[in-house]
Amino acid sequence: MSGRLLYWLVMKPLSLLPYWMLYGISDFFCFVLYRCIGYRKKVVLGNLKMAFPEMSDSERNAIARKFYAHFCDLVVEAIKNFSARESELKKRFVNLNPEVLDHYFNQGKGVIICGGHYANWEMWGVSTPLQTQMPLVAIYKRLADAYLDEKMRETRRKTGLDLVPTREVKGFLEENAGRNFGMVFAIDQSPADPKKSVWIEFLGQLSPAYFGAEKHAKELNWPMVYGHAERIKRGHYTVRYSVVTENPTAFEDGELIQYVSTFLEEDIRQVPYLWLWTHKRWKHQNKQPNGVRTWTKADVSEKI
């Protein structure tokens, strides 16, 4: 099915349903994905075993069950974003301290905002622009289907979030030199090329990481902020911002990525099922180039 048909025959009609009906659909698909198909179950349990070797199999299976329920909720909540009212979005994803972002905006500064695929990053993207003065720009990878890509960008832009494809970031920054905004990065993606990565310790594993958030923080000399997201109850989330640093150039290359990743790791360890365990985060683990430094939590322990 083409992206155009998928959008108009499936996604758009589903987005018009109330949340309670969508959660019924979520429950059904959770049963199918987890119990019947076992969608990426080997990957999920493998990741959990690597991250939590001290846990028993039953403990990791319990996290996996909760994860699949949350994952299916994420899918229907993302679909609902196509039609959700602004008042509903602000109620369901609350920014607890948007004054952290507003403070820098009022000072005439931009800010680097870091987070991970944790809680509900999609709902954060459409609700947060409604709750802060700071213009927000998210760096993302284009969808393979051009029509769905455009619809996704259209949905997020209607509440104020701008999206810039990864390959267009340099041109965007040149065109917007002197403009202040919040530049949003997901710091937990697995880089396509491990040779062009920063190597850090994350969830007890040797992990390649993208350098972009640190690179732009240093080049622009913008403060870095991390968003601690929480799930309050089904369909309701909050985010609380912590200032990582106001002086990114004081960090060695790679050190800042390790430092901010400890914030995400702490959140994951507290509530593991809210992270996106279906992606192969450590698929390049054994491809670290010779002579490349690995940063560890011990290296930044004095800053934590």
Image (cartoon, rainbow, N blue to C red):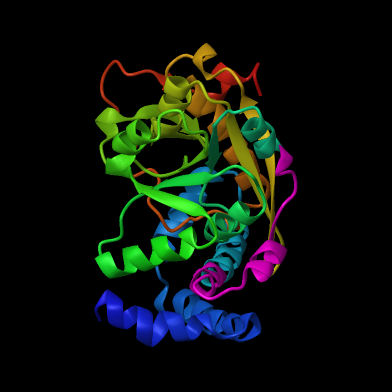
In what quadrant of the picture does the N terminus appear?
Answer: bottom left
Task: Name which quarter of the figure residue 225 lies in.
Answer: top right
Question: How many labels were placed on the picture?
Answer: 0
Q: Is residue 40 visible?
A: no
Task: Name which quarter of the figure residue 285 lies in.
Answer: top left
Q: Position of residue 242 (x, y in %)?
A: 68, 35
Q: Position of residue 203 (x, y in %)?
A: 53, 38
In the rendered view, would you say 35 is above or below 258?
below
Front-most of 284 and 246? 246
Q: Is residue 290 visible?
A: yes
Front-most of 162 and 238? 162
Q: Is residue 161 left or right of residue 209?
A: right
Identify the magenta region. Answer: 73-99
In the rendered view, would you say 233 is above or below 192?
below
Is residue 119 shown in magenta? no
Q: Position of residue 128 (x, y in %)?
A: 61, 53
In the rendered view, would you say 223 is above or below 188?
above
Front-most of 222 and 272? 222
Q: Residue at x 60, y 60 (%)?
A: 63
Front-most of 89 and 61? 89
Q: Residue at x 48, y 60 (%)?
A: 156
Q: Position of residue 127 (x, y in %)?
A: 61, 59
Q: Is residue 68 left or right of residue 241?
A: left
Q: Residue at x 69, y 33 (%)?
A: 103
Q: Residue at x 56, y 25 (%)?
A: 297
Is residue 96 shown in magenta? yes
In what quadrant of the picture does the C terminus appear?
Answer: top right
